[in-house]
Image (cartoon, rainbow, N blue to C red):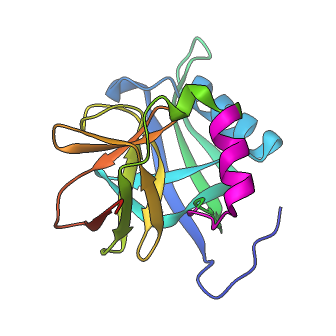
Amino acid sequence: MEFDGPEVDPITFDMVLRADLGVNPIKELDKWRDYVRKGKRAVLIIGNRPFSNNAFVITKINETYKNIDNRGNVLSIEVTVDMMEYPITIKTTKKTTQNTAKKATASNSSNTSKKKSGTITITVQSVNIRNGPGTSYKILGIASKNNTLTVYEKKGDWYHLGSGKYITASTKYSTFKGVS
C-alpha cells in the first residue's frame, strides 16, 4: 500500500478497552490485530461523521494490560493505535464514444433497465454513499467535492447510482443535471 500525497496524514489514538463497559478487551484487540495483518482499510467514523474523505489503515498497536483479576481474566487494556490515511478514489463518469456506449447498453441489461437520468456534482467536502435510500443504511464510501456521479433514478429524497448505491438528493450537497 502507498501512503503518499499532500493530504495523507498519520493519526494516533490512546484508548482503554474495559470489560466493565461491555467490551471484551481480548476479542476487540484480536480484531484490531487482524486488521493490521490484513492491511484492512476503512473509513474512520468519529461520532457519526467521517473523519476524512479517505480511509485509514491500522499500522501499529501498542498494548498494556492494566487490570487482570485473580482468575486471569483481562479487565482492561490500554491501547495506542497508529493509523495512516489511505486515499480512496471514487469512480467518476467517463466520456464514451457512440460505439462503446452502444456496446455497454447492449451488454449491461441489468443496470440499463433503468436509463441514466442525469449526473450530480458534489458541492460540499464529502457526502456518504449508502447501500439503500436512507440514513439507516450502511455507508459504502464517500463522494468528495467536485466528484461527478451518474444518476439512474430518484427514489424519494435519494438518488440511485446503480449497483445498489444511493446518495442523498438534497440540494445542500450536490447539483443535479438531467439528461437533455
Q: Residue furthest top?
A: 71
Relative to residue 169, is residue 109 drawn left or right?
A: right
Q: Which residues are magenta?
A: 92-106
Prevalent SS, magenta region: helix
Q: Is residue 73 left or right of residue 39?
A: left
x, y percent for residue 16: 46, 45
Q: Is residue 100 left or right of residue 123?
A: right
Residue that appears at 57% across and 25% down: 110
Image coordinates of residue 164 in percent, x first then y, are: 47, 31
Residues 142 and 68: in front is 142
Q: Residue at x 70, y 64 (%)?
A: 97
Residue at 81% x, 69% y is 2
Number of numbered discs present?
0
Quarter holding the C terminus is bottom left
Residue 59 pos. (x, y %) = 74, 57
Residue 174: name its quadrant. Answer: bottom left
> Is 42 drawn above or below residue 146 in the view shown?
above
Of 41 and 125, nearer the camera is 125
Q: Quadrant of residue 138?
A: top left
Q: Considering depth in this image, is 39 or 153 the residue closer to the camera?
A: 153
Q: Is residue 59 visible?
A: no
Residue at the bottom extreme of this rendering: 6
Q: Is residue 121 visible?
A: yes
Residue 105 magenta: yes
The percent position of residue 155, horizontal first and vertical second, equals 23, 36
Q: Is residue 161 magenta?
A: no
Quadrant containing the N terminus in the rendered view: bottom right
